[in-house]
Amino acid sequence: MQTILELKNIGYSYHSLHGETQALTNISFGVREGEFIAIVGPSGCGKSTLLSIIAGLLSPEQGTIVVNNPDGSLNYPRIGYMLQRDHLFEWRTVYKNVILGLEINHMMTPDRLEAVERLLVDYGLEKFKDKRPSELSGGMKQRAALIRTLALDPQLLLLDEPFSALDYQTRLFVSADICRLIRAAGKTMIIITHDLSEAISLADRVIILSNRPATVKAEMPIRLTLKDDSPLASRNAPEFQQYFNQLWEDLNNDG
Amino acid sequence: MTAKTKKSSTKHELTKQEEFVKNHRRHHHQVSTMRIMIFLFFLILWEASAYLGWIDSFFFASPSRVALCFLEQLKTNSLLSHIGVTLFETIVSFLLVLLFSLLAATMLWYSHKMSEVLEPYLVVLNSLPKSALAPLFIVWLGTGTTTIIVAGISVAVFGSIISFYTGFQQVDPEKVTLIYTLGGSKRNAFTKVVLPGSIPILLSTAKVNIGLALVGVIIGEFLAARRGLGYLIIYGSQVFQLDMVITSIIILCIIALGFYKSIQMIEHHIRKKFKM
């Protein structure tokens, strides 16, 4: 698998009159095509800042992001960003919500709209097209938010604790569901989470960040024997507990 | 046996629901009855005290004198055209206030620096009693409709700029970020999130503003008009026709109520349309 994005020595600080707060320092890692990466770290360590930098919403103060597209072009990969909450707009119907990105980018072409239509059917939302978001269940809202992101056909999906607003039970199902759909769509994914089980069950590789200023403390490739099964079943894989303990140790030792 | 209890329990729930609906209706019925009673009680007390000489009906009028005055003014003094003038001036001021303050608040939202620079000016202009400006408007603009509309605008516009701008700022910043993650511009953020997200605040501010515009217009008419209800009030007090003053005030009450109800209806319509 080819590396499509490489972060080299990324650093970022927040500035205020009281001084400078270093959020990220010397962060380097690569993202391979089709890979699922989970980033874990202590709360407030700058995980969201890192994601905003990758998404291009912030520019890094130090370091560079190198792009290696499969076709050799230097274009920054098309990135879809899923925020912590679904943020579907109540004043729009579900359909109007999922085509928001297309509307903004003036890309309401017949084939794009057809792709959206197909996703709505695949994800079981086509009957709810003309409903308001408040009439959907938590899981359906996340699916709608995913369609809104996928409508722009991104190569790389960034998920910033996307299920943290859901209750635990819904969260288990929805995170498994959404990641299965993203894998089926053949996308690359970086997900931020503070839930170690979620990280192990969803990702191919877990990147562990240190306390602020955050840097990469360890990287852990995950190979579960039940890999192709659902993330729910993968929690029962024999290696699961071992990975969990290892992650826990990596997170909590200050060495 | 179990089926029977189940059946009776749903029946029981139904009656509970019916009881709730009944209570709710009764409550509303009582409220409207009491409102009308207070109004009638006040009318009767007013008429009776004037009739029995408890109050001097020359100064305090009476319902019957108000009714007579109303009919007389309708015939001789073209009361309807006075009402029409005040209505027209108020509606024009109101619409201009909405237009100006929307434009200004949008500009403030676009430029954070500008909003910071202008903040103290807005606060001072908003707290200034606008009636103090009315004499200036007369000198600058003369006496007439323009002056009165400007007076109406001046009362409402600064407060409504502040309300709109505050409303724009209260929109969830993550929703704005969402627009940026979808590749949108600041303009997209405004038209897709900030403006539609502020509709409830726009509506509630409009409800306040129609009242304020009426206040401004009446102040303007006091000072600079030959027509309108404000003029009738001042004229009536100068020639000691207090019936005319009180009649005009009562008409103003009805106009204020009418405005409020119309905006409420528009609000209801918009909320239904956007399911908010």
Image: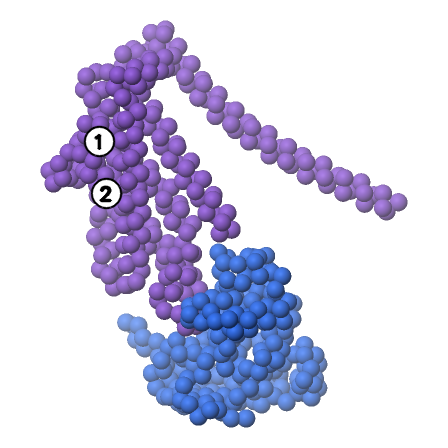
Chain colours: A blue, B purple
Does B133 sit left or right of A229 as displayed? left
Q: Chain of mark 2?
A: B
Residue furthest to the left: B139
Q: Position of residue B43 (x, y in %)?
A: 41, 17
Q: Chain of mark 1?
A: B
Of residue B192 and residue B112, the one placed in the foreground of this image is: B192
State the residue at coordinates (73%, 41%): B13
Residue receiving disc 2: B154
**Circle 1 sits in a helix, a strand or a loop, which is it?**
helix
Does A133 sit left or right of B49 as displayed? right
Residue furthest to the front: A110
Earlier-in-chain disc, 1 versus 2: 2
Q: Position of residue B254 (x, y in %)?
A: 37, 28
Q: Does residue A85 appear anywhere in the picture?
A: no
Does A187 sit left or right of B265 as displayed? right
User: In terms of image quadrants, where is residue A116?
Assistant: bottom right
Q: Does residue B49 appear anywhere in the picture?
A: yes
State the residue at coordinates (64%, 32%): B22
State the residue at coordinates (61%, 88%): A222
Q: Position of residue B267 (x, y in %)?
A: 44, 44
- Amino acid type shown at disc 2: Ser
Q: Is residue B41 above or below residue B29?
A: above
Residue receiving disc 1: B221
Q: Position of residue B110 (x, y in %)?
A: 30, 62
Of residue B271 and residue A177, the one placed in the foreground of this image is: B271
Q: Is residue B76 above or below residue B86?
A: above
Q: CA distance from mark 1 to mark 2?
A: 14 Å
- Amino acid type shown at disc 1: Glu
Mark 2 packing: few (<14 Cα in 10 Å), some, or many (20+)?
many
Of residue B30 and residue A216, the one placed in the foreground of this image is: B30
